[in-house]
Amino acid sequence: MKNILFASLLFLFAACGANNEQTGKAETESMATAEKKYACPMQCEGEKTYAEAGKCPVCKMDLQEVAMAETDSTEHNH
């Protein structure tokens, strides 16, 4: 009887752990495919961003990737 209970608990913990790994992989992949934004490092046009890397139309400096802040609090896993 103890062996069956132990095996059941072991299976339960293994199944729950695998689910967390799959969720973490899915979140990482979705973040990698998120839209990147680029902006002028001198902020010639204020907070304006561009969808593609290139040069600033005002100062001609290379646009730099902007770190996007996570604003949606529904994606947190507590």
Image (tube, grey):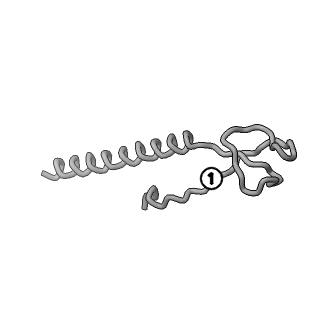
Vertical position of residue 31 compared to residue 69: above or below: above
Q: Quadrant of the C terminus?
A: bottom left
> How many numbered marks, from 0 up?
1
Residue at disc 1, secondary structure: loop
Mark 1 closeness class: few <14, some 14–19, many ≥20 residues within 10 Å:
few
The picture places residue 63, in percent across and down from the top left corner, at 77, 43
Nearest to the observer: residue 27 or residue 44: 44
Residue at x 27%, y 48% (from the top left corner): 10
17 left or right of 35 in image: left
| Position in image of residue 66 (x %, y %) | 69, 50
Q: Which residue is mark 1?
A: 68
The three-letter code of the residue at mark 1 reads Met
Quarter of image, res 55? top right
Q: Is 10 situated left or right of 39 in this image?
A: left
Is 49 situated left or right of 35 in this image? Answer: right
Residue found at x 81% / y 44% = 56
Question: Residue at the location (18% across, 48% down)?
Answer: 3
Residue reaching furthest left? Answer: 1
Q: Residue at x 73, y 38 (%)?
A: 53
Q: Position of residue 33 (x, y in %)?
A: 55, 39
Name the quadrant containing residue 32.
Answer: top right
The relative height of residue 50 versus residue 76 in the rendered view (above or below) is above
Q: Position of residue 61 (x, y in %)?
A: 85, 43
Is 4 or 15 nearer to us in this picture? 15
